[in-house]
Structure formats: C-alpha cells, structure tokens
Amino acid sequence: MRFKATSLLTSLAVAAIYVSAAGAENVQMEEITVKGTKLAPQEEVLTINEVRESPARDIGEALKQVEGIDIVRKGAIANDVVLRGQQKDNINVFLDGVRLHGACPNRMDSPSFHFDFAEVEQVKIVKGPYDITNPGGIGGEIDAISKKTGKGFGSDLSLTYGSYDMTNASATASYGTDRYDALFGYAFKYSGVPESGDGKKITEIYPATSPNRYKADAVDSKAYEINTGWTKLGLNPTKNSRTEIAYSYQDADHVLYPYLLMDADYDRTHMLNWSYRIDKVSPLVREIKVQAYWDKVTHLMDDRLRQSSVGKPRIYSMQTDASTQVVGAKLHTALAAGPGTLTLGSDYYNRNWDAINRVAANGYVDTAMIPDVFTDNLGFFAGYEIPIVEKLILKGGVRTDQTWVKADKQTNKAISETDYTTVAGNIQLIWAPMEHLEITTGFGSGIRPPDPQELFINSPRQQGNPFLNPTRNNEADLGIKYATDGFFVKAAIFNSSLQDYINIVRSGTTRSYANIDANIWGAEFGSQFSLPYDLFLKGSLSYTEGKNNTDGRPLSEMPPLRGTLALRYDVNTWFVEAAENFANSQDRVDSALDEKPTAGWMTTDLKGGYNYKALSLYAGVYNLLDKFYYSHLSYQRDPFASGAKVPENGRNFYVTLAYKF
C-alpha cells in the first residue's frame, strides 16, 4: 500500500511540473478562478454544485473532498467531521451564524446532521483558531451559508436515487422583489442498510455471540428516514438595510448506528434565526449587524433493535433520552479606522444539555447522565485589517470570554459549577509578491473551556472531571497559492501546540478525561490544472500527525495520509471524471486506549454529468472495484463503546436529476 501511495504522489508531482495551462472557458475554469482568487487565508469553500456531483448523504460526507477533513463513520449517515485531527467541540459548527450542538452524549447526532444540504448554498471552512467573532473553535469552524432568494419566481428541484434505495429529494420555491422576498423548502432522505465490499450489510459487523448484534428482523430495516422543512423571509426596509427571519424543522426517524451500542429512535430539531444588517451608516460606520437565534434538539436512543434487549422487562435494556437547547445573540460593527477596517462586537449564548439514562440492570431508574448542565458564555472581540503596502495586508484580532457552567442535577453540589475567563487572538499576513502568487502566514492562539460532558458526565462507563482546565491551541500556519485562469495550486503546513488538551483516559472499565500537553502538525496540497482538449487534472493530499507529549505516545484518533487524483473531461454541457482515492495505513495509534492499526486502501470512482439549460443530470459509481476497507476513524476504540469497526460502502451507484430556474 505504501508503494502504491508513493506512486500516486510521484504521478501527482510529475503532472504538476509538466502540465500546461490550456483549455476552454467553462464551468470547470470558473471553479479554478473561484478557488484561486476569492478565498481568505485559512479558508476553504465547498459549494452545493460540488455536493450534487457526489452521492453524499450529509454535509459531513460531502466535506471529505476538502483537504484536511475526515469523518468518523458511525453508520449510513450523521458522519462527524474531523478537521486536521481536531474533532468534537474543538470545532465550531454554524448555519448562518446559529451555533449548533447535538444532544447525544455519544455524538450520534453530530451538529452538521441537524440541517439538510438542500438548505445550503455553500459551506465555509476555517482551518485553525482564526475566527475571533465566535468563542471556542480552537481547531476551526464549519459555517454553512443558506441559499439566497433572487428576484422573481425561483425554484430548485433535486432527486437522487442510488444503491440500497438511497433517496435524497428536495424542493425549494422562492419569490423576491426589491422590497421583500420569501423562500420555502422541503427535503426527504431515506436509505436501506448499505453493504460493504464483502457483500455484507453494515448491520452484520458483530459476531453471532455478541449481545450488540442486530436482531434478525432489524438487519434489513431502513438505515434512516429524515424529513426537513424550512422557510426564510426577508425585508429590505431601505436600500442599505435588510432583515431576515428563518425557521427550520427536522424529523429524523429510525437512524441506525452500528458503530454504537444503541440506535436513534428519533431526533427532532427546531431552529429559529433573526438578523438585521445595515450598511454605510456613515463615513465612520460601514456596517452594523444584529442577530438572535434559538435551536433545540431532542434525541431518543435505545437498543430495542439489538440482541441485548431480548428477554428484558421493557422493549429495551438501555435507553438515553437527551435534549439540548441554545439561545444566543450577536452584535457586530465594522468601522472605518484610518486606512483599514476595525471590527468590534459582542456575543452571548446559553446552552442547556440534559440526558437521562435508563438501564435494565439498574431497574430502569433515571440516571442523570448529563446532569441538566447550563453553559453561559459572554464574549467581546475586536479585529483590524490594514493594507501595509500595496501587496501586503495585515489582519488580526483579539477576543475575551467569560464562561459559567452549572450542573443542576449534579449529586455532589460542591463540584457542580465552575467558571473560566479566557483570552484568544490571532495575527495574519497576506503577501502577493507577484501576479498570480499569494503567500500567507498566521499565528493564532485559541482557547475553549471543557464541555458539559467532559466535566460532568455520569454513568457506570463514563465519569466527568470537573477540575479540567481549558484547552489552548497555539497554532502557526504557512500557505502558498498560485493561480492563473487555468492553473491553480496551493499548499499549506501547520503546527499546533496544545496546552491542557482534553484527552480520554482509562481506569479499569471506566473512562474519564484529563489535561495533557500535545502537538498536532500536518500539511495539505490541492491543485487543479487545465489541460489541452478540455481535460482537467485535479489532485489533493492531506497529512496529520499527533503526539501526546505528556505520556510520550501517539495521539489517538489521527487520520493517515490521504489523497485523490482525478482526470476530468469537461465541455461545459457535459463531463466525465475518473478519480483514484487512497489512504495509507495508520500505525501511529495509542495502545493505552487499545487503539488498533488500520490498513491502507485505494478505490476508484467514476462520474459524469449533463447540463441543458435549467436541467442537470449526474450519475456515477463509487468504489468501482467493490473494495472492502475501513477508514481509520470508523470505530470506537476501547474504552469507548462497542469497539466494532464499520466498513465503508462497497460498489454503489447513484443518479441525480436537478432542475433550477
């Protein structure tokens, strides 16, 4: 596998040296232009058009095509995003600035699961601690931006059907004038249980003697069924002001998670968002923006589909009833300050998280697994961007936060609450020494307090640590980007020094959390070249390595070297593309947590598309050779939960038909 990976790297390097920038002006050329010239430092953008070309079931799966992003595979959907080795609450997730959290203590319902990508126009990814406008996010940020309403009537219809009866259907309708606009949308998702390359369903990963195995009548059940509806209303009171209010509701039923000991009976998500923005208030005040939002998730999971529930007094032997709610507000102002722009703002949010666990062994008595924890965070920030000389821009900022955390149902009241005062900041330089070339460097120091689970979780298998310190990420980044009309290449390297990194530790059969010092470093490479005869060559590489400096061993849950090489023929109205994807084996594992090595793999994908006026048709086959393989982040290691690996999908087909006007 390492030989194959090396061969792929060599091919990519040779192509980068010898390829010439020539080709027709088409959609693919526009993509090169966008990626080459319109992104800020430490940022990436994924558009809905890129998502539609793939069979992605959710935002997490779609984001895999971005360098530096991996996912934790838990089942057919609800994949959890890993950004440069950072995951969970080290990454902020937003939809139009609305802070999102899942309710499940085992992150069944990852934050990005709670909206549909049919709502979204693009996803902005910030890599590293470079967002001063929001608290936390020491590893980065996933910010989904919803669709905007154009003038007149508009509609966007999409239907995807694929292997395992996978169905993604969505419809939006909108109407807009100079004064007001409205948008309504609905999406439906459904799938049977996927099969891996060995021909077995992912519900068949457990041995016949395991109590975690699925019942015979559940092996072939649906993998998930999800309905999502949303609306957004906009009003332009004046030519330089706008207000919007948006609401969405998601109903997810019967979501299977072979990765875990239980499956989700349901997830119910409400999201309400209001914003007001006014531009060009005066020569001094360039922009004022106010936002208020609320979201709530209720989540019920149990083992009624598993063998462990057989013979119990109730239909389940274990159940967790969880909910989380966030209420927040933001104030953002942009001011003219000399030759630059000064940004000032404040934000506040309150999050409540409550999870009740019931098990047969304890007589189904309610146990406060997450003991009704309230988190309040008040923050202030200031940033400044200034052109030092014609081709050199300096930008930086600082924020401070006060965080209060209180567990209302904590048994030991002496350790039921805590608070933190934190300061974070960053500085970045963007230099364009010559046409088409841009060099960026940055240093960021981000910090995030422990989350409620890390502080207060209470179960026979898991215990929180109320004495944890906040984690600080001191990160340095260096990037280079060269882009012309038909040529785009970028490379980046980063190093994160993590103080008081919150790591999982084991004591017998119980897990808890402890602060350690750690280091994560890595590199990324992305490229896109226009070749003669309407051909395009695309390639990407990502590598991340982590070390537990306190204990002198590898940091757990680190993705291996991964990459893609694709050749595309694109004449604007239609295209075909072949891609080779690979990941090296990962043997840098934490043996203290019984983390096991994972073998490398290589797969082949084929896809094509046709566009005629407002109609688009896409089709493809992924994992063409039906390879059986695992991604390294595909199972919960001991002492997590089941310890069972979930393989990736075998050969799978899909067809997407879209109509937009």
Image: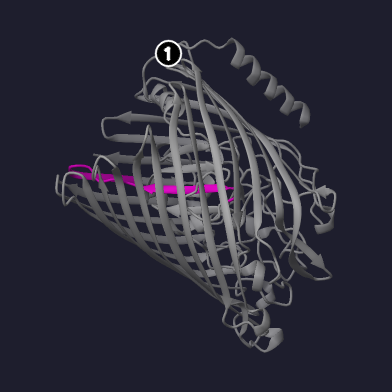
Residue closer to the observer: 50 or 121: 121
Tell me how the rendering is colored: one colour
Taking the image as shown, residue 556 lies to the left or right of residue 80, namely: right
- Which residue is found at the position 69% from the left and 19% from the top? 10
- Which residue is found at the position 53% from the left and 46% from the top? 61
Residue 144 falls within the magenta-colored stretch = yes
Residue 481 coordinates in the image, percent (x, y): 53, 24
Residue 205 coordinates in the image, percent (x, y): 70, 58
Give the magenta range.
Answer: 138-158
- Which residue is found at the position 48% from the left and 39% from the top? 54
Q: Which residue is mark 1?
A: 23
Q: Residues within 10 Å of mark 1 (few under 14, many from 20)?
A: many
Is residue 13 in view from this perspective? yes
Choose top left, top right, bottom left or bottom right for residue 123. top left
- Which residue is found at the position 72% from the left and 73% from the top? 463
Residue 346 to residue 415: above or below: above
Is residue 270 in view from this perspective? no
Query: Magenta stretch: dominant SS?
Result: strand
Residue 126 to residue 607: above or below: below
Residue 14 coordinates in the image, percent (x, y): 64, 14
Residue 100 to residue 446: above or below: below
Tell me which amino acid carries mark 1: Gly
Q: What is the quadrant of the C terminus in the image?
A: top left
| Label 1 secondary element | loop
